Every structure is written in structure tokens, then in C-alpha cells.
Amino acid sequence: MKQNKFGFLTIMFFVFGSCVGTGIFFKNSEILSNTGSIIFSLIAWCLAIFAVICIAACIKEMAGNSKENVLGNIGWIKTFCQTRFYKGFRNFMIYLYMPVTIFYLPFYFVQSLMDSLSIFYGNEIVIPFWMMILISFVMVVYLTVVPMFTKKVAIFQNYLFSFLRFIPLLFGIIGGLIIFVTIRHGSLANDLISTTLPSTPTQPFSLTSVSPFLGIIASIPAIFFSFDGFYTCSSLEKDMKKPEQFSKALVCGIIVVATFYILFSIFTLLAADGGTIIGLNNAWDNNASWVKICKFIFLLCISFAVFGAMNNWGTYTVTFTQRMFERREVILFSKNPITSKNKINLIIESFLVLIFILLTTIGIFYTKLKTTNLYYDEITCRLFNFVSLISNWLSLFIFFGLGFALVGFLFKNKKCKTSTKYLAWISIFFISLSVCFEITNCFVTLISSIIWQTQHSSQSLDEFLIPNILKTLFLFSILSILFINNNKQGEYWVKTV
């Protein structure tokens, strides 16, 4: 029987489905806060999108020269970089990136659910923090246990919720346009350039407060997060009717996603307070039942979109980790090899639960999120702010891995196309700039918060100092996993039947 092949438009649809899910619905306010204006926010979007397009244009040639393309970006690092870098990024994927992604996505789901329910609750607390944590925990267990025993249910859920991703995007674009044209409600009054620091600062110094130009750099990780996952489509090239069109289809898919993102960003920034989804909801201040129902459906569809992303990542995490077990690349402190797949699944689930408990505990002590939403309690605000931080950093370091792979590819394939070389170096520049800025800013804010605490001894420790210490420790854990490893063949590995 002749195997069905994917067409050009199908690949574009896969790119759309792999990207759209959470980032665009939750990162606009953060980008606006960093840049201070709509214009600078759009500049940040354009620069980051340009970098993503450059990466996408290089993937076909890089993947075509990789011996481990089945592992995606980790396989590219293994092919083109030194072994210790491969082991570092492999460990980052297994022990940090995927478990932490599974941790924070349910909180985005609960956040969008709370936004939708707030239509009927007014200014009351919709879901207390302990219930939010419980719902998130149940979602983590459900979305990782299901693919361990049946992929069919996970695939069905993917088809069921994938198409719902289009609805909130279109609703945000059209609704934002209507609201702006009719009542001109939103963030239009923000200054275009604001480089003057306040004479009496109310918080420790940060590089983002120096200039909106640095705010543009600080916004790149949030935008990378919105595109995270597009590179997973690289394995589909061999299944295309015309594989030579894969690179073009991938770039076109990114451009389509970017077009939706920019339109959504523009109209939510123009029509909503702070560029937030809930700000768009508040802009249309009407208590009519049909208006409330429209708002509720819009915000509920966002929660469905997040659920679709959660389902995809739950399946991907379980499948990828099981594959790494089979390749004997998961380290355990046990002399006896584990041969039972049920035990392996139990180990995976136990580790995910442990990470969830650990990060939830850290998030509870993180800094309070500045918000006017009275239906969030204080601990919920802290958790949401922590989730926003780690989601940006994880995506940034995944793109950092792509940059590593591109550097190795360029050095090992000096006869590659000239256009590929230029695009690769442009990508590497933007990735490196963003990583260096985030690391520098992290240590600058830590030192600043220590000085601030000594000058304001009456200030609560959990206001600035403890959050910045936790943030620095999290960054240090990422860098340690990536670059400090001594994995040798003599270690104990898991072996499956």
C-alpha cells in the first residue's frame, strides 16, 4: 500500500499547531511592561520573528546532515557539537525542560479558566490558591499517565482541541479592532520612549529600567516562548510529497503564525488595558447577558487552547523520555538495571510529581505579581509570576541549544549554502544577545536587591530579595545542567527489554 504523503499546506498547518497554544495569550503584557510602548513592543516582535524565520530557513539543511534527526534539536547537537555539550543539553531536556514545562502549562490553563469564570464572579476570588494547585496537579498526572498506556486517547484529545486554537486568535484580532474603533480603549497613551529613571525608585535596579531598547532585548525570550515547538516539525520532511519544499513550507508556516501574532498583539495592545486578555475583556464594559456569554466563550476557548498544548507536551515528554530510556541515556543511582516498562513509567511519573511539588513550593515564595485582578489571591499572583519567568527562560535556553547546533553545523559543513551561513549567524547573534542579557540582568538585579535590602531594612525579605535569590538559583541550575557534567559510560544506565 502506498503511504500517504504530506502536502505543502499540511506542513504549514503542523507548524501552526506546534506553535500556537499559550505564549501569545499571556506574554503581551510582559512585553509591553519591558518596552513601555506599543511601537517598541512591535519592534521586539519583529526582531524575534526575524530570528525565528532565520532559524527555520536553516533547519532543512542542518537536519539533512544530521545522523540523529529522530531526536530533533538534541540530535542536531549530538551530530554537530562535542559530546559533553550533547550530554548537557540532553540532561537539560530530560531533567529540567520537559518536567518544568509539564509543571507550568497547567497553571496557564487554570489562569485562563479563572479569567473566564471571573465574568460571573466579579471581584471575588474565583479559585483559591490551594484549589488552583490541586487542579494543576491533577492535570499533570492525567496528561502524562494517559500517553503511557494509550496514545489513541492523547491523539483524539489533540484533534479535539487543536482547532479551538484558531477561535481566540481570531476573536482577539476582530474583537480588539472593534473595541479600538468604537471606544479607543487600551494602552495607546503609553510613552513611545521613556529613558528617564524615577528620582525615587520603588524597587531594586534592573537593566530593563534603563531604556526601552534594553526592554526590547528582554522581550525576546517571551516571544521565543510563543514560537517554541516549531522545530519539532523537522521529522516530517521525509513524509512530504515534495521534500525539497520543506524549508519553504516551514518558513511560510512561521510567517502565517507571525502574522496572526502581530495582528493579535496590535489590537489587544490598542484595545486592552496593559495588553492583557482580561484587559480586552474589561474594555467592553457591558453587563448584558449576551456580552457576558461572548466574553466567557472567548476566555474559555483560550483555556481549551492551553489544554491542547498541555496534551501535546504531555505526550511528547513521555514519548521522548521513554525513547531516551531505551537508548540507555537516563542515569539512575541503581546497580540493578530496570527492565520493566511499568517501573520505568512509574519513575517518570514520580519524577514529574516531585518537580511539580518542588517548583510549586518555590513559586509560593516568589514575588507578588502586580495586578489589578482582585479574583487572584496573593499566593496565586506569586505562582503566576514565577511561571512567567521560568517559561521564558526554558524557551530561551532551548533556542540557545538551537544556536549551539547551528554553530557546530557551520564549522562542520563549511561548504553549505552562503545564504544558510548568513541566516545561521543572524540567528546565533539574536540568541546570544538575549542569553547574555538575561544572565547579566539576573545577577545585576540580585546585587541590586541585596543593596536595596540593606538600605530598606524594614522591607519584607520576600518582596525583592528572596525572589531574586530564587531566580538566580534557578538560572544557576540551568547553567549547571548544561555545562557541568561528567557522564561516563561506566555509570549505571537504565536498560529496557
Image (cartoon, grey):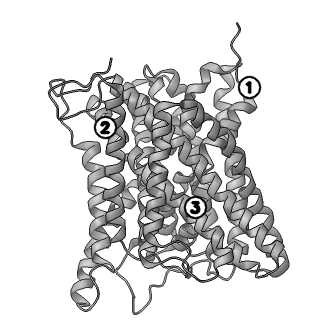
Q: Position of residue 119 (x, y in %)?
A: 68, 75
Q: Which residue is mark 1?
A: 7
Residue 347, label in figure: 2
Vertical position of residue 194 compared to residue 490: above or below:
below
Residue 78 visible in the snapshot: yes
Labels 1 and 2: the sequence-earlier one: 1
Foreground: 156 or 466? 156
As helix, strand or loop, the secondary structure at mark 3 comes to helix
In the picture, measured across the screen, residue 83 lies left or right of residue 93, that is left
Vertical position of residue 69 compared to residue 41: above or below:
above
The N terminus, quarter of image: top right
Instruction: Classify residue 187 by image quadrant.
Output: bottom right
Mark 1 surroundings: few (<14), some (14-19) or many (≥20) residues within 10 A: some
Quote the CA–CA distance across marks 3 and 1.
Answer: 32 Å
Nearest to viewer (mark 1 / mark 2)? 2
Q: Residue at position x 29%, y 28% from top? A: 329
Residue 176 visible in the snapshot: no
Q: Position of residue 177 (x, y in %)?
A: 80, 68
